Every structure is written in structure tokens, then in C-alpha cells.
Image: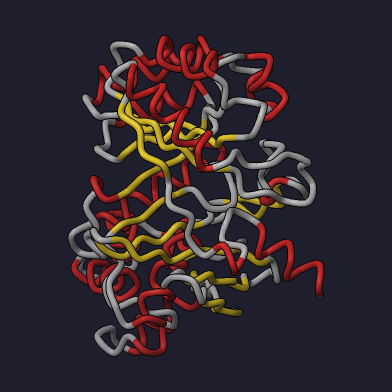
Amino acid sequence: MDKIELNSLSYDEMKELMVSFGEKAFRGEQLFSYFNRNMGLTLDDIKLLPLQLRDRLKEVGRVNEVRLLKRFDSQLDNTKKYLFLLEDDNIIESVLMEHNHGLTVCISTQVGCSMGCSFCASTKEGRIRNLTPSEMLNQIYLIEKDIDNRISNIVLMGSGEPLDNYDNTLKFLDIIHHPKGHNISFRNITLSTCGIVPRIYDLAKENIPITLSISLHSPFDHIRMEMMPITKRYGIQELMEACRFYERTTRRRITFEYTLIEGVNDRVEDAEELARLLKGLNAHINLIPLNPIKEYDRNRPTTSRIESFKRQLNKRNIQVTIRKEKGSDISASCGQLRRDYLAKK
């Protein structure tokens, strides 16, 4: 029988486990806070629990340990890129970025990704497996320990598709937000998806006040299909209906990620159709100039063309920002550093 992954248990699950041992429920609270407030990684160090109880926990459970493998520091800004080693020797990555509003960490939710987006390095070997809640949580905890500072914002936009690992992602959100744990506000968390439509409806019904970010990248099905195979399953119209349902249900603004690719999706007709799609929706567009990878033979537009595209959208009353590139000297876009590291190995 598989052992329980103790540091992936929710607050209620931790209390229920202790009660099943004949212990008081507050012992579960102590263990939950040890993992998620004190960022503990071994049962031997939690002296609040009696030795006999710790031994019982070791009999039925285990602590999933993530190790910091390597850190890369950008010489251009304060961005840091982390590689983490999992217990099964898989490697995942996270990015720490410094902004005016605080420190943001972008974490992985899967080892690899099965979505197949043409311009993304993290999907080139496909999905190897889902991450457990503790493997997501410990990316944050280990980075905080490394920099001796607290993370203020979390983005689920690293390697992997969060909605393709739905149950573990929801559990991660519950644990990281819990007041007895790390107590991060839902409003400081962004979840990015390529558009798994049924799960957008499911997430809307959860009514968690996170920020939903949709990777759109083209307003035309035939162009988006070439970049994002998910479009074959869920067309843009179907995706937009789900987004409108999400906005009505949660009353939360939706962000649309739009990677600008020269000659592909940076034309006036693209801006016009994009504005038509988003009309009446509480939305914001995040323009991302392409970060080229060797497997995708396209270029980023010139600065003047990027600015022109932004003006076209502004003229049509669409809120737009251009994402400032971070850590370009350390391969800080999704999946690049992990692939480079594995290739060298």
C-alpha cells in the first residue's frame, strides 16, 4: 500500500488523519503549519509532536522532498531561475522576478507539458507526469528560504498546463492560501491556461478570486490552430463563451496573453478581430514579444511594430500592457533552462 504524501495534505485532511490516530485535531494543525508556515521537510524536526506520534506518521506516511538543484542569476536584472530535483530524478523549473509591487514566482505544475504549443520549449518532450501539491508548494518555500524573503505573488505559468492537473492545482491553491499555512491572498495568484474549456467552467464554479489568464495568441482559429493544437478541440468561439461565463460568475477581470510573432499575428486585421472578440468583456491584454527558441523558426516583431499593435488595440478601447522581458540572459521563458540543462547532461 502506498504511503500518504503528508506534505500534500490539506488542513482538514491533516486534522482528520490525526483524529484517525486517536489524537486531538490540533495535532493536525501543528503538522500543517510545520509544512506550510515553517516550510519543514522532515518529520524528525517537528519537536511539537511526541516521538511516538512521529514514528506512527512515518509508518503510514512520507514527506515528498524537493531539492534545489541549481540557481541561475540574471546579470541584466534581479531575475533568478531555479532548477529543482524531484524524488524520481525529474527536473522542474521556476522563475523569481522582482517587480515594483513585490516578488513574483512563476512555478511549474507538471513535468513537461502535453499541450504542444509550437513556440513553447516546455512542451517539446510532452508531459512526463503531473506534480503533486507538495511539489508545487515547495518550489515557493525553497525559493523563500534561498532568498530569505517572502514571495508576494504567484503565477502558475511555468512548465505545464495547470488545468490539465486540475485536482492537484486546486489543492495547491487551498493550501497556499490557508491562514494556518502560508496565507497568500487568492488575489495575488494568477493561473494561466491555454484554454481547456470544460475546466474553465469548473474553475468558474469554484469561484476562487484568483486571476485567470488565457493564452490566446491569435483571434483566428486557423492561425491559432497552427500555434496551439488545443484549438482543434476547443475553438476560439467556444473558448470565449467559457471566458464570458467565467467573468459573469466570478466578476473577475480576465487577462489574455498574446505572444507577438512577426508576420503571424501582429497585423492590423489581428488587432481588429481581437478587439471584436473582447468587446464588452472585462479584459486586459498582455502583449509578449516572442522569445525565440531553436525549434520554432519565427521572429519577434520590431519595437515599432509592437508599439503599433498596442496603439491599434488602445484605439479600440482595449486595455493593453507590453510585458517587460525578464532574465533573457538565463533562458527565463518556460522550459528553456530545463531543456538546456538536460541536453548538456
In the shown orientation, is residue 317 left or right of residue 232? left
Q: How is the image coloured?
A: secondary structure
- Does residue 205 appear in the picture of this structure? no
Query: 140 or 271, which lies in front?
Result: 271
In the shown orientation, is residue 343 left or right of residue 30? right
In the rendered image, residue 51, in percent from the top left (x then y), is placed at 35, 89
> What residue lies at 61% left-to-right and 49% top-to-bottom?
291
> What residue lies at 74% left-to-right and 66% top-to-bottom?
340
What quarter of the picture does the N terminus occupy?
Answer: bottom right
Q: How many marks?
A: 0
223, above or below 181, in the image: above
256, above or below 129, in the image: above
In the rendered image, residue 242, in percent from the top left (x then y), is placed at 42, 17
Query: 250 or 261, which lies in front?
Result: 261
Picture quadrant where residue 38 is located = bottom left
Query: 144 or 321, which lies in front?
Result: 321
